[in-house]
Each structure stands twice: as C-alpha cells, then as structure tokens.
Image: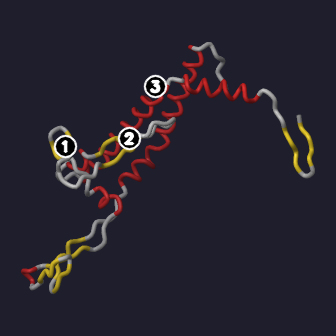
Amino acid sequence: MIQAKGKYLSVQIKGIEEYANKLASMVQQMPREQFNSIVKTQSELLQSKLKNAYQPYVNTGELQRSISIYQRKKKDQYFTYYIGPQYSGNKSQQVNGKSAAGNAAHFLEYGTVDRYVSNKSKGGVSLGKGRQYGAKSYRGRVAPIGLIRRTVQENYNSIAGALVNNISKAIEKWYKQNGLKTIK
C-alpha cells in the first residue's frame, strides 16, 4: 500500500518479514565449512605467490619461511585469513625446524631512510642511549620494494574471480541438493 503524506511517500509491504525470515534460515543452512575451505585454498595460493616474490631477496631464508596464513579468531559470518610475515621479538619462531622471523619484512615493503652508525675506528664515540659523537659510518639505504602490495595487486583479479566462481558453484550445488530453484 502506498500513501502520500505531505512531501513523503509511505510504503507498506505485507509479508516481507516471512520472506526475510526464510532467507535468514537458508543462509544458516548453507555449507559454511565448504565456503571456509574455498577461501582458505585461495589464501594458500596467495601465500605461495608471496613466498615466490621474496625468492630474489633470500639471504638466510627466515623472511620467506615466515610468510604464513592466520585465520581470524573471531567467530562470525566472515571467513577472514591474514597472509604475511610472522613478526617475533626473538628467533624462537620455527618452521620445519628452522628459524622463521619476518622482522625485516617492513624494510623491503617500505624501505628505510639513510642510516648511520658511530664508528670508533674513525674517532667516533658512543655516548649510550642512542646518542653518538664524532665520526659516523654510512650504513646505506633500502629502497621500498612493496612486495606484499605488488603481489596482492597482481593476483587480485584471478583470486577474486576464483572465489566468486567457486562460491557460486557451491551455492548452486546446495540449491539443487535442497530442491530449490537457482537465482540468475
């Protein structure tokens, strides 16, 4: 029923609550574990691509081994996986018996400013607490490479497309198994 009230229209739809409740119950019955598996598979694919992107920068292998997938702990309707380096305060992080600290990942991602250290052999004296006096040695600069951002951008369309395609297929299969008509 549609009524005009001053400048506004009032719309009243009967029976919409019934459909909303049916839709909500259908969502609860859908194959959530299958959706989670689809998202996890695509996350693992991105993890693999990110590890490959770090390959030219391998020195000790710790950073590359530290690339991991973390599943969001919060229990809600979302399937969230975080992919990236594991940071640790020490080298106790282990992957296959080898150290896997990703503490240097931000240097490759964002770069550094020019770095200097006090050089005692050139007459420099450290005063403690980060202060120094005298000659300094130039330690260099790391240019930003942006491996994580670049890898995500390069693979976004293929991974997002695979997610949409696989989840759509899972929903269609569920619809057919439950005797429902698919929505096109």
Amino acid type assigned to the residue bearing label 3 in the image: Gln
Amino acid type assigned to the residue bearing label 2 in the image: Leu
Image mark for residue 46: 2
Density class for disc 2 (Cα within 10 Å; few <14, some 14-19, many ≥20) is many
Q: Earlier in the sequence, mark 3 or mark 2?
A: 3
User: In the rendered view, would you say 74 is above or below 110?
Assistant: above
Please say if the residues under marks 3 and 2 sit with CB atoms less than 8 Å apart.
no
Amino acid type assigned to the residue bearing label 1 in the image: Gln
Determine whether the residue tagged by mark 1 lies in a helix, strand or loop: strand
Q: Position of residue 4 (x, y in %)?
A: 92, 44
| Badge count | 3
- The residue singled out by tag 1 in the image is 94
| Viewport quadrant of the N terminus | top right
- Residue at the extreme left: 121
The residue at 50%/42% (across/down) is 157
Spatial CA span between label 1 and label 2: 21 Å
In the picture, measured across the screen, residue 55 lies left or right of residue 180, that is left
Determine whether the residue tagged by mark 2 lies in a helix, strand or loop: helix
Spatial CA span between label 3 and label 2: 19 Å
- The residue singled out by tag 3 in the image is 34
